[in-house]
Image: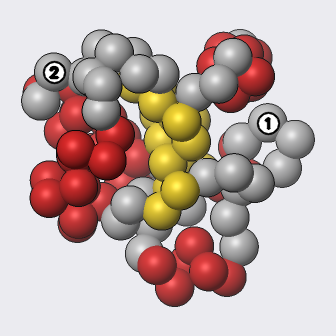
Amino acid sequence: MAGNIVEEKIKAGALVVDVRTEDEFMDEAYPGAINIPVGALQSRMKDLEPKDRPIVLYCASGARSALAARVLKAAGWTDVINAGGLWDMPGY
């Protein structure tokens, strides 16, 4: 079920953010995703504005993206989804 919501968000134009390391991202990533490693999220939040922009987060297993989702929600983002790991992404 979560996959359907993620797919709908992506089709509607949500920003897809890979919160893995740059090396992981360069190795393989979801088409159209941008890379903001979870450790750099605090300093790069402006890249994700406006705060009501739909954002889909993923990492390798879902743990880092869950942390990133909590950080963004605490900072005022209103439409954030943790899609889990790269292999959980729709069509991947």
Please rate how many residues cluster around mark 1, counting C-alpha atoms within 10 Å: few if below 14, some from 14 to 19, many from 20. some
Quarter of the figure with residue 29: bottom right
Q: Nearer the viewer, residue 85 or 21?
A: 21
List the single residue furthest toward the right.
Answer: 91
Residue 89: image location, x then y, percent: 72, 42
Residue in the image at 46% along x and 30% along y: 55
Residue 16: image location, x then y, percent: 56, 42
Judged left or right of residue 6, residue 92 is: right
Name above or below for residue 21 compared with residue 63.
Answer: below
> How many angstroms separate mark 1 from mark 2 (CA)?
26 Å
The tag on residue 34 is: none
Give the residue type that dot 1 points to: Pro
Which residue position is annotated with label 2?
A: 76
Secondary-structure class at tag 2: loop
Indicate the quadrant containing the N terminus: top left, top right, bottom left or bottom right. top right
Residue in the image at 69% along x and 17% along y: 12
Please rate how many residues cluster around mark 2, counting C-alpha atoms within 10 Å: few if below 14, some from 14 to 19, many from 20. few
Which residue position is annotated with label 1?
A: 90
Give the residue type that dot 2 points to: Gly
Judged left or right of residue 90, residue 58 is: left
Residue 34: image location, x then y, percent: 53, 56
Judged left or right of residue 20, residue 41 is: left
